[in-house]
Image (cartoon, rainbow, N blue to C red):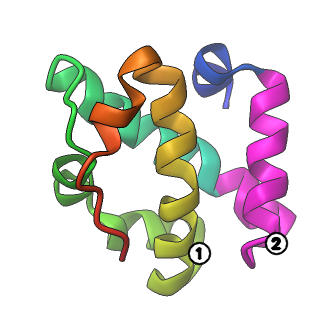
Amino acid sequence: MNSVQSIIGDKTAGLLISGLIGRGFSEEQAQRFLPEASSKIIAVFDKNDGITDANTILDSMDLAAIAFTVGVDNKLIQSGMNYLLPNIFSQLGGNRMGEVLSGYKHF
């Protein structure tokens, strides 16, 4: 989780894990999900030079592969992504947060 923590910070990573646990992840699942999903979000964001459309990022990600890697079902991945995307975007998007999330469709 080190590369993700370098972007979001240790304190924020801990808060995100707590939030994921509150959405049905076990602690172990949350600890696997956070770096896996965050690194994918960051990679798509970087690849598209700071893309400002959350739906495009979601459409670019293989959520089934993330679910398989983390060992949870797709419904839990969807819940985790709905929680994680705004939090990661707030770190990546800075003052463009509203623009990044405009039109964001929840699962």
Residue at 77 percent of width and 57 percent of height: 19
Amino acid type at circle 2 is Ser
Q: Quadrant of the C terminus?
A: bottom left
Q: Say the numbered circle drawn on residue 16.
A: none
**Relative to residue 78, is residue 93 depicted above or below?**
above
Q: How far across and how far down the image is residue 36, in percent? A: 52, 47
* Residue to which mark 2 is pinned: 26
Principal secondary structure, stretch drawn in magenta: helix
Question: In the displayed structure, does residue 51 sit left or right of residue 22?
Answer: left
* Occupied quadrant, residue 15: top right
Q: Nearer the viewer, mark 2 or mark 1?
A: 2
Three-letter amino acid code of the residue under disc 1: Gly
Which residue is nearer to you in this view: 40 or 50?
50
* Numbered badge on residue 71: 1
Task: Specify few, some or many for label 2: CA neighbours under 10 Å numbering under 14, 14-19, or 20 or more.
Answer: some
Relative image position of residue 46 (x, y in whole percent): 26, 21
Magenta span covers which residues? 10-32
* Left or right of residue 106, residue 59 in this image: left
